[in-house]
Amino acid sequence: MDFNKLIARVKAILTTPKTEWPVIAAEPATIADLYKNYVVILAALTPVATFIGAALFGTRIPLVGTIHIGMGALLTQLVLTYALGLAMTYIVALIIDALAPSFGGQKNPVQAFKSAAYCYTPVWVVGILNIIPGLGILTGLLGKVTGQLAADHSEQPRRPRRVAAGLLERGGQRRLFEGANLVP
């Protein structure tokens, strides 16, 4: 596993998505390699940051104050959040693959998984803010903004049919199909 390559990919997706998406679409990959070299690492950022933030600072509940959750509950939350993040990446890829023909694309499980995995990048990176509980609330907003910026710089034309993309619009996942070159 080459962390320099991982960091370069993350930086390119966030800063130059217009040039990075064609590179991603053209490179050979397998779902197992994408999981091992990308998803497993980045999907851990948000749960680990949340764990550290909650362990150090506690969890603030409006009108109640700050509470400290036990280590057992925090570890359970970490493991479940991480496992669900890994599973959701695959589930979103299945949805993309199933809906690709309705957007004029072709069914291709690897391309669909690339799209799901790389579109989660802004959300995973911004999830680091959860290390400071007060900043964690910005995670969703910043993930959506960075994802939208990435989508707006895609080379693919906008499509009038946005029903499926609208269903997947969460945390910067808008226009998954166009971003991964699943649509001609």
Image (spheres, grey):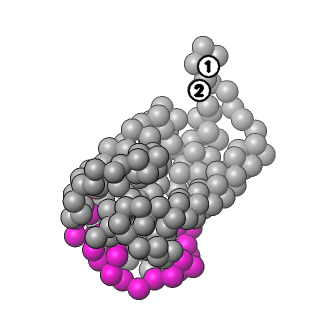
Magenta region, mostly helix, strand or loop?
Answer: helix
Under tag 1, what secondary structure?
strand
The correct choice, above or below, for 34 with respect to 11 in the image is below
Q: Residue furthest bottom?
A: 28
| Residue closest to the eye, 118 or 115 | 115
Query: Along the horizontal axis of the image, is 48 left or right of 17?
Result: right
Q: Quadrant of the C terminus?
A: bottom left
Marks 2,1: beta carbons within 8 A: yes
Which residue was labeled with disc 1? 65
Is residue 38 found inside the magenta-colored segment of the image?
yes
Residue at (32%, 44%) from the top-left corner? 145
Give the residues drawn in magenta, as a range: 15-42
Amino acid type indicated by mark 2: Arg
Amino acid type indicated by mark 1: Gly
Residue 103: image location, x then y, percent? 37, 61
| Residue closest to the eye, 77 or 163 | 163
| Residue closest to the eye, 166 or 146 | 166
Is residue 151 found inside the magenta-colored segment of the image?
no
> Is any atom of residue 46 visible in this view?
yes
Under tag 2, what secondary structure?
strand
The correct choice, above or below, for 132 with respect to 103 in the image is above
Residue 1: image location, x then y, percent? 49, 81
Residue at (58%, 35%) from the top-left corner? 57
Residue at (61%, 39%) from the top-left corner? 54
Q: Residues within 10 Å of mark 2 (few under 14, many from 20)?
A: some
| Mark linked to residue 60 | 2
Query: Along the horizontal axis of the image, is 159 left or right of 120?
Result: left
| Residue closest to the eye, 75 or 167 | 167
> Is any atom of residue 34 visible in this view?
no
Q: Residues within 10 Å of mark 1 (few under 14, many from 20)?
A: few
